[in-house]
Amino acid sequence: MLVHLHLHVVFRYYRSSGAVMSFRRYNQVRLRENGQRQQKTERNSETKSHTMLSNTSMRRFRIWLTAVALVLTVAAPVQAAQFPTLECETLTGQHLTMPAAARGNPALFIVGFSKASSEQTGYWSKHIPKDLVPTYPIAVLEDAPRLVRRMVVHGIKTGVPKPNQDHFLVIYDNEKELKAAAEFQAPDDAYLILIAPDGSILWRFHGAFTHTVLKDLRDHLQGVRQ
């Protein structure tokens, strides 16, 4: 009985002092705060998911771009290198512009970049059949001093048969471009460059004569004429 009376008094005290209302308001505040924290957590989760999706989409887009670039690279036609335009002088004194003077036919240029290369270039010139392809030996004299160029040309001329002198070319310029076309490596080698009727480079070789290389040249010419 005393316990019951005591509880009744305590309850009336808290009720009269507004403690019950404060407790209710406290619960409401706690619920509201919990709700706000829950919403914030959900928003953070959504933002994180959106970021992950965006990163995934970007990775997929980059992979797609790379694949497209590879396909375009493979599918794009590779343009053949062109033989450079050369202003030439023959041993008979004629002035020609190559490759235009080849008149739309395949042509083979046998190029020497040094005096020592004349042994290989001369051997090649003698051992390529005349009916195989029009052949033009080229002596590059860009580095030769102007005062001695005439003497050098005269010396070359004495070693070339007369019927071949109108096809033997001397150039004084564009050595750099010709070296690039020949894929220059060894200065004392002979360099062979086969061009198509449109002036594009079909085949290259540098070094001494061999029958294996001559056969390879024949095969390339057969492909052009088919």
Image: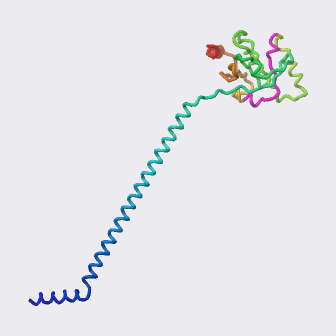
Q: Residue furthest right?
A: 147
Is residue 167 located in the magenta-colored stretch of the structure?
yes
Q: Work out whether residue 149 or residue 94 is closer to the camera in this orientation and state it.
A: 94
User: Going by the image, does 109 lie left or right of 47?
Assistant: right
Q: Work out whether residue 130 or residue 225 is closer to the camera in this orientation and state it.
A: 225
**Residue at 10% across / 90% down in the picture?**
2
User: x and y percent of residue 30 in the render?
Assistant: 31, 74
User: Going by the image, does 220 lie left or right of 100?
Assistant: left
User: x and y percent of residue 23 in the render?
Assistant: 27, 80
Is residue 71 located in the magenta-colored stretch of the structure?
no
The colour scheme used here is rainbow
| Quarter of the image with the C terminus in it | top right
User: Going by the image, does 51 lie left or right of 98?
Assistant: left
User: x and y percent of residue 53 in the render?
Assistant: 42, 51
The tally of labels here is 0
Residue 168 occupies quadrant? top right
Q: Work out whether residue 99 or residue 191 is closer to the camera in this orientation and state it.
A: 99
Q: Work out whether residue 11 or residue 209 is closer to the camera in this orientation and state it.
A: 11
What span is in magenta?
163-179
Residue 69 occupies quadrant? top right
> Is 58 situated above or below 189?
below
Q: Residue furthest left?
A: 1
**Residue at 42% across / 54% down in the picture?**
50
| Quarter of the image with the N terminus in it | bottom left
> Is 30 situated above or below 21?
above
Residue 176 occupies quadrant? top right
User: x and y percent of residue 172 in the render?
Assistant: 83, 27
> Is 84 situated above or below 22?
above
**Residue at 44% across / 48% down in the picture?**
56
